[in-house]
Image (cartoon, rainbow, N blue to C red):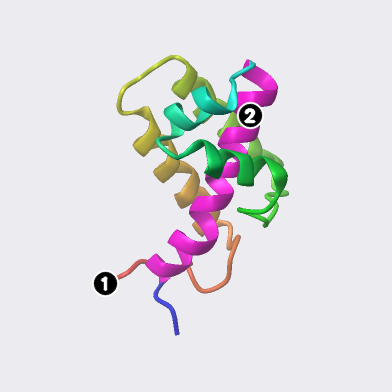
Amino acid sequence: MKTPCEIIVWKVLPVIRKEFAKNLIENHGFTQKKTADTLKVTEAAVSRYISGKRGTSEILDGEILKEITKSVNQLVEGNGTALIEEKCKICNLLRSSNFIEGINYACK
């Protein structure tokens, strides 16, 4: 059985990165390179997020999608600590919404 932390690394973080990447490219006109630099991932990873090969789960909750848009706006504004804070904020929202079963409790 995987720990909640392992599930987050393999299932949740890729979805968050995918949504951030899509938003940066589609709504802010970022290139894949600029998106990769902003998200601290490789250009290849951004390509996989955009093509649907990584982060394949979909977020359907409209409120969480609105929060993702707010988070991306923080990244665009260039706040140096925004990436960590915003990923954690969205991760906590997904955990509390039972986005993926088995991560609705914290590691002890």
Label drawn at residue 108: 1
- Neighbour class for label 2 at 10 Å: few (<14), some, many (≥20)? some
Name the residue: 69% across, 47% down.
61
Q: Residue at x 68, y 49 (%)?
A: 59
Q: Amino acid at mark 1?
A: Lys
State the CA–CA distance, disc 1 to disc 2.
34 Å
Secondary structure of residue under mark 2: helix
Residue 25 can be seen in this image: yes
Which residue in the structure is indicated by mark 2? Answer: 23
Q: Is residue 22 magenta?
A: yes
36 to 89, vertically: above or below: above
Q: Nearer the viewer, residue 69 or 13?
A: 13
Residue 10 relative to residue 97: left or right: left
Give the magenta part as a residue range: 4-28
Name the disc covering residue 9, or none: none
Count neighbours of disc 1 (C-alpha within 10 A) and say few if under 14, some if 14 to 19, many if 20 or more. few
**Residue 21 percent location from the top left of the image:** 58, 34
- Work out whether 107 lies above or below 60: below
Q: Nearer the viewer, mark 1 or mark 2?
A: 2
* Chief SS of the magenta region: helix
Looking at the figure, which quarter contains the C terminus?
Answer: bottom left
In the picture, residue 47 is in which quadrant?
A: top right
Q: Which residue is at the front of the view, 96 or 99? A: 99
Q: Is residue 46 left or right of residue 1?
A: right
Q: Which amino acid type is shown beneath numbered disc 2? A: Asn
Q: Earlier in the sequence, mark 1 or mark 2?
A: 2
Task: Give me the residue at 59% from left, 19% from top.
Answer: 30
Q: Give the x, y percent position of residue 51.
A: 71, 44
Residue closer to the observer: 71 or 80: 80
The secondary element bearing badge 1 is classed as loop
Q: Residue furthest left?
A: 108
Q: Quadrant of residue 25?
A: top right
